[in-house]
Image (spheres, rainbow, N blue to C red):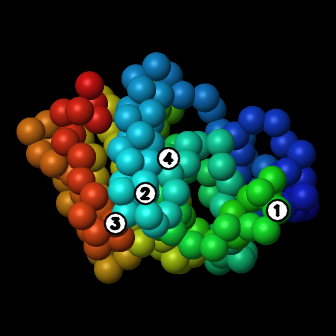
Amino acid sequence: MMTVADLYRTEGKAELVGGEIVRLPPMGYRPGRIAGRIARSLDDYAEATGRGEAYTGTLAYIVPKLPSGRRSFSPDVSYYDGPLPANPMDFISGPPTLAVEIRGEADYGDSADARLAGKRRDYFAAGTLAVWDVDPLNECVGLYRPEDPETPVVFRRGDVAHAEPALPGWSVPVDWILG
């Protein structure tokens, strides 16, 4: 049975789920570009509001053990508006306010959809206020919220996506995200 201490010693992006270290694959160029743009917009929002911080997929969030067995998240991009650890080298204790998952090569098909839906349920069980599912191939952003975790608000090219009410006033054009 792996622990949070083992996660600290794991190289690369990984999560702790069901007592196992689950390694996450690196991104391709388009998902990576999308992640950078979203992180940049969230960082601008954090600076403008004086609240929260934006992070890339290299950060881990540690949560109390969830019914699924999950103990951590490492979203592709995230925004966190909570207390930071006293030791700046530690993982953040608690869930992200907004988690952004950007689909990669292996994130399409029925089994991938089921895996991503399970992860969204875990985010909401931990206390995350909004989850984005960014789909580069279908060129859309799905906004999921805890009050209706199975039905997204879908933003497409020409739309301006948001994460209300989790990030009041933050929005970004889908065309700019997708490039």
Is label 1 in contact with label 4 (beta carbons under 8 Å)?
A: no
In the displayed structure, would residue 142 be above or below residue 34?
below
Picture coordinates of residue 28 (x, y %)? Answer: 50, 22
- Which circle marks residue 46 in the picture? 2
Q: CA distance from mark 1 to mark 4?
A: 22 Å
- Which circle marks residue 87 in the picture? 1
Q: CA distance from mark 3 to mark 1?
A: 26 Å
Q: CA distance from mark 2 to mark 1?
A: 21 Å
- What residue lies at 61% left-to-right and 29% top-to-bottom? 26
In the displayed structure, would residue 162 be above or below residue 30?
below
Q: Amino acid at mark 2?
A: Ala
- What residue lies at 16% left-to-right and 48% top-to-bottom? 160
Q: Amino acid at mark 1?
A: Asn
Q: Amino acid at mark 4?
A: Val
Tag 3, which secondary structure? loop
Q: CA distance from mark 2 to mark 3?
A: 10 Å
Mark 4 / mark 2, whichever is N-terminal = 2
- Which circle marks residue 77 in the picture? 4
